[in-house]
Image: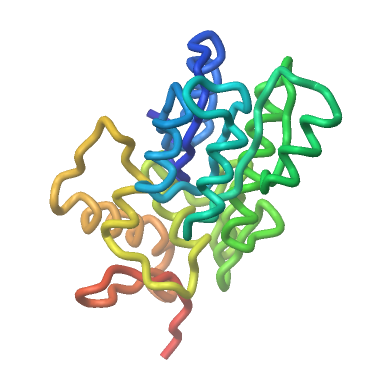
Amino acid sequence: MGADIMRVLFVEDSEHLQKPVATALKASGFVVDLASDGEEGVWQALNIEYDVIVLDIMLPRLSGLEVLAKIRQSESSPPVLFLTARDEIEDRVNGLRAGADDYLTTPFAIDELLARVEALSRRRYGARTSIIELDDLAVDLSRKEVERAGRKVVLAPRQFALLEYLIMRKGEVVSRTDIEEHIYDEYQSPLSNVVDSAVCALRRSLQISPDAFPLIHTVRGHGYIMELRKS
């Protein structure tokens, strides 16, 4: 499994399209949940927190437009990318007016889909560029590269996943449950101490020198927060 970072729901009834897109998203570092019809898509969207939803307009049971309407009527507000073979201007307008954040028609290049999903996930956390910084730490979300004080930091895929999620929510307390949901997909059940162990390993990797300030802090009983504390 790749460097799983953000959680994406892909609602698509065509297995021919579902498999390659899901594979590409996972390889690019996303946890991917799949739904094959509109009703299943609605249930997952309303019961699981997603960073981006990729939604086909033409779906059985409920159309993509109906799915989006139900999502927007709820408290959930993830960015939605419509994915469809229909290339009429009217379809694009209807999708955007219904609350879609972006629109992509088939055939499309996988790289373009990945770039759009990455941009939407960054937008959800208020990141306008692919590089997020905290003091002397720089994380390039697109290149999957990390530098601290000008030195390259090599991270295992799971470590990068954790760092990316924490730094995109820097200044916020992130619970262990949130981390589990964004690092593990629906087919994996993390062990009880896996998050604590992962955070400990990431801290060691970022401690490039004895005098480097710690950037990940434990908030006892609540989770973790990524911020600079020099005192």
Quadrant that contains the C terminus: bottom left
Q: Quadrant of residue 221?
A: bottom left
Seen as rendered, the residue at the extreme top is 16
Seen as rendered, the residue at the extreme right is 89
Seen as rendered, the residue at the extreme bottom is 231
Whole-percent x, y for residue 49 in the image:
41, 50
Q: Is residue 119 above or below residue 210?
A: above
Q: Is residue 141 above or below residue 113?
A: below
Q: What residue is at 63 percent from the left and 63 percent from the top?
A: 126
Whole-percent x, y for residue 67 in the image:
53, 38
Looking at the image, can residue 223 be seen? yes
Quadrant that contains the N terminus: top left
Taking the image as shown, residue 67 lies to the left or right of residue 155, namely right
Q: What residue is at 63 percent from the left and 32 percent from the top?
A: 114
User: In the image shown, does 46 or 214 lie closer to the viewer?
Assistant: 46
Taking the image as shown, residue 6 lies to the left or right of residue 97, namely left
Whole-percent x, y for residue 177 in the image:
27, 57
User: In the image shown, does 129 or 21 lie closer to the viewer?
Assistant: 21
Q: What residue is at 64 percent from the left and 60 percent from the top?
A: 127
Taking the image as shown, residue 120 lies to the left or right of residue 16, namely right
Looking at the image, can residue 159 be seen? no
Coloured how? rainbow
Whole-percent x, y for residue 163 in the image:
44, 55
Q: Is residue 122 above or below residue 36?
A: below
Q: Is residue 82 above or below residue 46?
A: above
